[in-house]
Amino acid sequence: MDQRDEQEFAEYFAARRDSVRRTAYMLCGDWDKADDLAQTAFVALHRRWRKIRDRAATDAYLRKTLVRASIDESRRPWRRERQTEELPEPAPGGDRLDELVATRQDLLAALRRVPPRQRAVLVLRYFEGLDVSGVASVLGCSEGNVKSQTARGLANLRGVLEEVDTHG
């Protein structure tokens, strides 16, 4: 890569690093794993940087690489252990902000218990803001598959959240 390409990549990386890391966290539920996934995606992007002619498609390529890395990682036998970390209890008598944070923590914990492909669809649809066709493009599947995975993922997420609510 020439110096101009390296500079463009460095600028792109600096602009997108935090967003990609947050998306990776939503996909896996662990900041260390999120860092690894983001690094994997950026390394893959760096390898192909010179070949990307349509810079507007860079975000889509990076997103697809990130999601596929997350799904691939979840399929590895040593990664199949369940998250058992306990979430901290909200402070007693908390205000509305404390309630929002607790709700967000519950949501993220529940999202970790949804199967990886369904989790990817939910993250892409509701946190990344992609439409059905955009998610289908990222995952390389049909729009019908995205719709069914969304429905199943939401049902699983609701079930986990209800379980947390009744046991919490």
Image: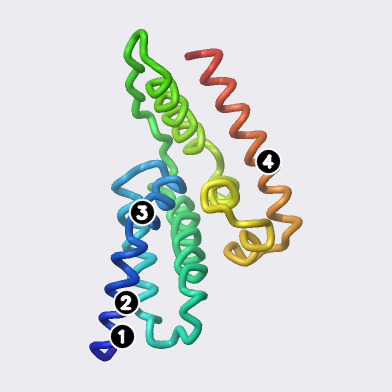
| Residue at the limit of the structure toward the bottom, as seen here | 2
First-in-chain label (1 vs 3) = 1
Marked residue nearer the N-terminal end (4 or 3): 3
- Element marked by disc 3: helix
Q: Residue 5 carries which label?
A: 1
Query: Which residue position holds label 2?
Result: 9
Instruction: Say which of 159 and 58 sits in front.
Output: 58
Q: Which amino acid does label 4 sit on?
A: Arg
Residue at 26 percent across and 91 percent down: it is 2
Image coordinates for residue 4, horizontal then vertical, percent:
27, 87
Which callout, 2 or 4, points at the residue further toward the start of the chain?
A: 2
Residue at which label 3 appears: 21
Residue 45 in the figure: left or right of residue 138: left
Pointer 4 local density, CA inside 10 Å: few below 14, some 14–19, many at least 20: some
Specify the amino acid type for callout 2: Phe
Residues under labels 1 and 3: Cα distance?
23 Å
Camera-near label (2 vs 3) is 2
Answer whether labels 2 and 1 touch (C-beta < 8 Å): yes
State the CA–CA distance, disc 2 to disc 1: 6 Å
- For the residue marked with disc 3, what is the amino acid? Arg
Camera-side mark, 1 or 3: 1
Q: Give the distance between the C-alpha atoms of the residues marked 4 and 3, in whole angstroms.
A: 25 Å
Q: How many residues crowd around disc 2 within 10 Å: few (fewer than 14), some, or many (20 or more)?
A: some
As measured in the structure, the alpha-carbon distance from the residue carrying label 2 to the one carrying label 3 is: 17 Å
Spatial CA distance of label 2 from label 4 is 37 Å
The mark that comes first in sequence, 4 or 1, is: 1
